Image: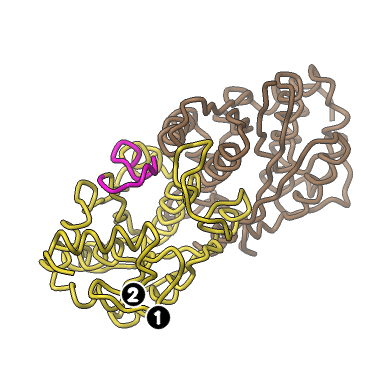
Chain colours: A brown, B yellow
Amino acid sequence: MKKAIVLFSGGQDSTTCLFWALKHFDEVIAISFDYGQRHSVELKQAKKITQILEIEHHILSAPALNEIGKTALTDNQEIKNSEKTQLPNTFVPGRNLIFLSLAAGWGYLNDVFNIVTGVCQTDYSGYPDCRYTFIQSAEMTLQLALDQPKIKIHTPLMFLNKAQIWKVSQDLGALDFIIENTHTCYKGERSQKHVWGYGCGTCPACELRKKGFEEAFGYL
Amino acid sequence: MKKAIVLFSGGQDSTTCLFWALKHFDEVIAISFDYGQRHSVELKQAKKITQILEIEHHILSAPALNEIGKTALTDNQEIKNSEKTQLPNTFVPGRNLIFLSLAAGWGYLNDVFNIVTGVCQTDYSGYPDCRYTFIQSAEMTLQLALDQPKIKIHTPLMFLNKAQIWKVSQDLGALDFIIENTHTCYKGERSQKHVWGYGCGTCPACELRKKGFEEAFGYL
């Protein structure tokens, strides 16, 4: 019985990972995080998706990610590059390591040592905690933190661009499902329907989704 | 201006670290974590101590540590070794990595890259995330997660036993303060006063504190 946890935001990448995990593991558990993100519509989509797919789903609360400081993901700032760090101000520092740690902790107590995350170095917007070197280091640190060498972080999308991720979802037979059910937009917009899904169509996350779709399937 | 964050529980070890940091840095910020621990009396002591010492203090909320599973630190179980893991059932998996990640995230947004923690390999009760190898790995992982090579984790107590930690607090002129103000007891007991401080006197944490005091100062 091979089991895996998928870090699941309800967005395009993590839903693609969910389908990938369903193909490669016997049992899949989705874990989402509530940290006061302003695109909390994601969590509703995450719940809806796991209900449709009949997957065990847990939402863990990490308000500390909001408390440590104001970023555009948890606040009402305009989304732009930070002058100080040159990173998009959507960067919540430490976020992926905290997500991975909580998932590994849950897995430790439930005998699940495979963790799947949709982080992606290719379109990583400069987020350092989406890089492969970070993931390798985090895997070793988690093995040491829990004294559990079986812990393995899987990153099926690591070296793909958005167009390739769309193609993967098509190969997995999940394209229509992902267009219809996944949420990407940083602004939480879901009233506007496009051929690539729902969203404001102009925030960096929508731009990336739209551009990838266009590259993958050549029309828009 | 050298600044440091101290991971601060209000217990003996982290208060010793606080005095150590006050000696070695120009500015010290204490960060505590509220995760539904049943010895939440610690947080009251933490607040009291930072008020007496006039130190900036933040409490971050991480209820996810409680949500991921039931351990004796967050539940009403009897404290004993887990049959499954051979670790004390007070082990909250992933806890120290989550604390370090949140502290590093706060520090990233506030230009503080030194993090002091009182973890200790010597009396570590089998907790894997108190070992030096874990700390070294966590430091590199945090540097990669935040793309910030200045991040440094200081562990002044790493290779000391409890008796030596008592001696350090004496050297720092903090012995009476620590006896009077720090909390250790897992059961949250503070009505019983002993020569080494307050506590039930029988839980593993009290036993360790008492034994160390006896070894350091030769009386009880």
Residue A2, quarter of picture: top right
x and y percentages locating residue A134 in the rendered image: 45, 33
**Chain for numbered disc 1:** B
**Residue under the point 39% across and 66% down:** B185
Q: Amino acid at mark 2?
A: Tyr
Element on which disc 2 rests: strand
Residue A4 lies left or right of residue B4; in this view the side is right
Range covered by the magenta-colored residues = B122-135
Residue A8 lies left or right of residue A173; in this view the side is left
Residue B210, quarter of picture: bottom left
Q: Amino acid at mark 1?
A: Ser
Residue B165 lies left or right of residue B113; in this view the side is left
Quarter of the image with the N terminus of chain A in it: top right
What residue is disc 2 on? B198
**Chain for numbered disc 2:** B
Element on which disc 1 rests: loop
Q: Which mark is residue B191?
A: 1
Q: Nearer the viewer, residue B35 or B80?
A: B80
Q: Are marks 1 and 2 in contact (CB under 8 Å)?
A: yes
Mark sitting earlier along the chain (1/2)? 1
**Residue under the point 88% across and 52% down:** A191
Residue B6, quarter of picture: bottom left
